[in-house]
Image: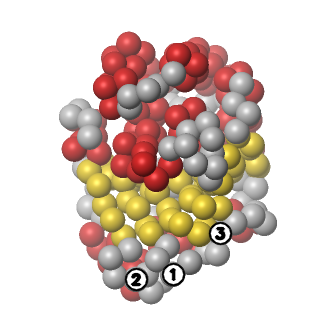
Amino acid sequence: MTYNDFINILTDKFHGLTDEQKEKFRAMEGIYKEWNAKINVISRKDIDGLYLHHVLHSLAIAGYAYDELAGRQLKILDLGTGGGFPGIPLAIMFPEAQFTLCDSVGKKIIVAQEAVKALGLTNVVTVNDRAENLPDRYDYIVSRAVTSLDKFMPWVKGKYSKGIFYLKGGDVVEEIANVMGQFRLAKGSVHTWPIDSWVNDAYFDGKLVIFIENICN
């Protein structure tokens, strides 16, 4: 997917996208190709799929929850951000929100930090640490399948007030059932949304946005 293909989809899905936002999305390609050549955070074969596999995939969270996130002064944690996904695309899309991008692997957070700097994102901070050590509480947590949900949930216990947006693929029925029982999540608090219902591309077959709503906050 080229930048032009990507931006055509984006302008169709999100009306009111500004020229500044479009330019930041355009700049991502050069920034990530440059930094990925220095510090490999995206596979060499996959870097050409940046817009489809990483940027648009990240923005599926916006596709699912635009009305809840747009124009609001929220605090959002991207846990296990790697080189900045899904946090950086979401930070471009939602400039009013404040994003913290956290990863325990130093070389990955360097790439995220340099991308934030090059893009001029003033609503993003980067942290090289483990989730358990973060002192703040956030409105939302976003993440892109850094581990299974039963391992992820203890990392974020007590760290969010509204919910978790988790990007994951495959058959998640048993995983969700297990995590609901193990962590006593309220009935109706876990929602799944197939991304291919939003963008009709084979890459998104079986990929989901999982939203875990904090009903008892």
The foreground one among 211 and 72 is 72
Q: Is residue 130 above or below residue 37?
A: below
Q: Is residue 19 above or below residue 181?
A: above
Q: Is residue 165 above or below residue 37?
A: below
Quadrant placement of the N terminus: top left
Residue kind at label 1, given as amino acid type: Cys
Percent coordinates x, y for residue 70 in the rendering: 50, 44
Which mark identifies residue 188?
Answer: none
Disc with the residue nearer the chain's start (2 vs 3)? 3
Percent coordinates x, y for residue 196 in the rendering: 24, 42
List the residue tagged with mark 1. Answer: 216
Q: Nearer the viewer, mark 1 or mark 2?
A: 1
Asked if labels 3 and 2 touch by Cβ distance under 8 angstroms, the answer is: no
Percent coordinates x, y for residue 125 in the rendering: 75, 43
Disc with the residue nearer the chain's start (3 vs 1)? 3
Disc with the residue nearer the chain's start (1 vs 2)? 2
**Mark 1 residue crowding within 10 angstroms, few (<14) / some (14–19) / many (20+):** few
**Helix, strand, or loop for circle 1?**
loop
Which mark identifies residue 159?
Answer: 3
123 left or right, relative to 51 = right
Res. 130 in view: yes
Residue kind at label 3, given as amino acid type: Lys
List the residue tagged with mark 2. Answer: 186
Asked if labels 2 and 1 touch by Cβ distance under 8 angstroms, the answer is: yes
Quadrant placement of the C terminus: bottom right
192 left or right, relative to 48 = left
Q: Residue at x 49, y 73 (%)?
A: 214
Percent coordinates x, y for residue 121 in the rendering: 69, 30
Residue kind at label 2, given as amino acid type: Ala
